[in-house]
């Protein structure tokens, strides 16, 4: 199961700069074989301080982080939903990703042309959103026509779907993204099948100037306001600086970061926010041979988590021994956790928590 996050935005806002910094950070990571599936797709390690702690504890032969994929999607322009600027192709690329990172230009640089002549984060966001909504509207209208026809023939499911589509159509006509709507779980499941662009979880990336690393400018405030109105995260990044950070040798980075007043690269935050946006959490398997982070969706039960490792583990699942990361690190070893009684035996219905360290018992 590959989870991916598409990088979208107007042309010249810094999408490729950020994508390249992300992929070259991945390429440099010591023990993950960076794979280029496609020049626009990068597999990126998810930075996780817990993994480093577990590494200190176990000194395993192998340390394996978990990863997510980022996709650099070419810039959308006004009119994309009508096919302008290869718009349909790019909209199609967005349809294929699980979540969206919308890069918004907040940096001033007279050498970099803005498609609209001047910087305007709020306007830029609205341009992109409008194209996504227009594309959705077109799809929804087509589907609505066909569902209404079926409903006339007495198809109850079609009637329910048509009602839902009519509500979505009204939302889109009012300029509201589908992701901001109030829907029941049942409706959400139906909506998933509509493959709508504005239904995808979104985060905003404010690409700031070198002199506004903390994102205090009024330009970033415009992005924050829109994001807050829909409960979306904002990651402040200076694409240019991030490119400089990844160009440094790993041992040179801490000093450079400190000189900028940063604790970590902005990219690390972007990756983690992207991971969270996708509804993903991490569990660990630990031992002297390997300490490994595994990705699952929030709400995954123990047997399915085991299935991530091997299908036999899921098929023959008996139970899982679970120690939470924080207990394991505090107590210093698996055996100590057992002795103190914090090691739990969990069965088939156990919902795995972020940070669980797990050992699966199975029989096939
Ligand atoms: N000053 C400055 N320039 C940037 C920054 N990020 C990107 N650029 C420049 O903006 C131009 C367009 O960037 P690019 O990543 O190709 O944009 P894309 O069209 O969105 O992929 C390039 O010349 C970049 O060097 C930034 O944070 N600060
Ligand atoms: Mg580009």
Image (cartoon, rainbow, N blue to C red):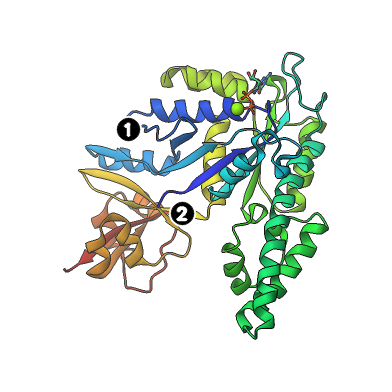
Q: Residue at x 68, y 50 (%)?
A: 232
Please, is residue 343 above or below residue 332 in the view?
Answer: below
Rendered location of residue 88, percent (x, y): 64, 42
Label 2, label 1: how many angstroms apart (C-alpha)? 22 Å
Q: Residue at x 81, y 58 (%)?
A: 173
- Which residue is label 1 attached to? 33
Please, is residue 301 above or below residue 114 in the view?
Answer: below
Residue 262 shows in this picture? no
Q: Give whichever of 196, 142 is nearer the camera.
A: 142
Residue 210 shows in this picture? yes
Looking at this view, name the residue that lies furthest to the top.
111
Left or right? Give the position of 223 relative to 356.
right
User: Contact, CB < 8 Å: mark 2 with mark 1?
Assistant: no
Rendered location of residue 340, percent (x, y): 30, 62
Rendering quadrant holding ligand 1: top right
Total number of numbered discs in the rendering: 2
Secondary structure beneath disc 1?
Answer: loop
**Residue 122 position by quadrant:** top right
- Which residue is label 2 attached to? 281
**Residue 304 position by quadrant:** bottom left
Q: Residue at x 64, y 35 (%)?
A: 86
Left or right? Give the position of 29 relative to 80.
left
Secondary structure beneath disc 2?
Answer: strand
Viewer-side label of 2, 1 = 1
């Amino acid at each position: 199961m590959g989870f991916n996050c598409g990088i979208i935005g107007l042309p010249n806002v810094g999408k490729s700069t950020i994508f390249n910094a992300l992929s070259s950070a991945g390429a440099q990571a010591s023990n993950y074989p960076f794979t280029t599936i496609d020049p626009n797709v990068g597999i990126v390690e998810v930075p996780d301080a817990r993994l480093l702690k577990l590494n200190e504890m176990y000194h395993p032969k192998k340390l394996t982080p978990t990863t997510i994929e980022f996709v650099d999607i070419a810039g959308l322009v006004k009119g994309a939903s009508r096919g302008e600027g290869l718009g349909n192709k790019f909209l199609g690329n967005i349809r294929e990703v699980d979540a969206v990172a919308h890069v918004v230009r907040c940096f001033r640089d007279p050498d970099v042309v803005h498609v609209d002549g001047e910087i305007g984060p709020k306007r830029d966001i609205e341009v992109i959103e409008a194209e996504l909504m227009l594309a959705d509207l077109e799809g929804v209208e087509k589907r609505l026509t066909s569902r209404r026809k079926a409903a006339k023939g007495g198809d109850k499911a079609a009637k329910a779907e048509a009602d839902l589509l009519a509500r979505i159509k009204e939302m889109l006509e009012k300029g509201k993204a589908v992701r901001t709507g109030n829907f029941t779980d049942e409706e959400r499941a139906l909506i998933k099948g509509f493959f709508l662009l504005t239904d995808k979880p979104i985060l905003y990336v404010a690409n700031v100037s070198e002199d506004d690393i903390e994102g205090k400018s009024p330009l970033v405030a415009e992005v924050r306001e829109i994001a807050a109105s829909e409960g979306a995260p904002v990651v402040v990044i200076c694409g240019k600086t991030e490119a400089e950070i990844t160009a440094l040798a790993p041992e040179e980075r801490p000093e450079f970061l400190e000189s900028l007043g940063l604790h970590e690269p902005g990219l690390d935050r972007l990756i983690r926010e992207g991971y969270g946006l996708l509804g993903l959490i991490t569990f660990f398997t630990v031992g002297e041979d390997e300490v490994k982070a595994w990705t699952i969706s929030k709400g995954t039960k123990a047997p399915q988590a085991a299935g991530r490792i091997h299908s036999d583990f899921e098929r023959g699942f008996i139970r899982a021994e679970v120690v939470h990361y924080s207990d394991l690190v505090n107590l210093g070893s698996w055996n100590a956790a057992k002795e103190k009684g914090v090691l739990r035996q969990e069965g088939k219905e156990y919902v795995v928590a972020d940070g669980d360290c797990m050992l699966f018992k199975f029989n096939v």
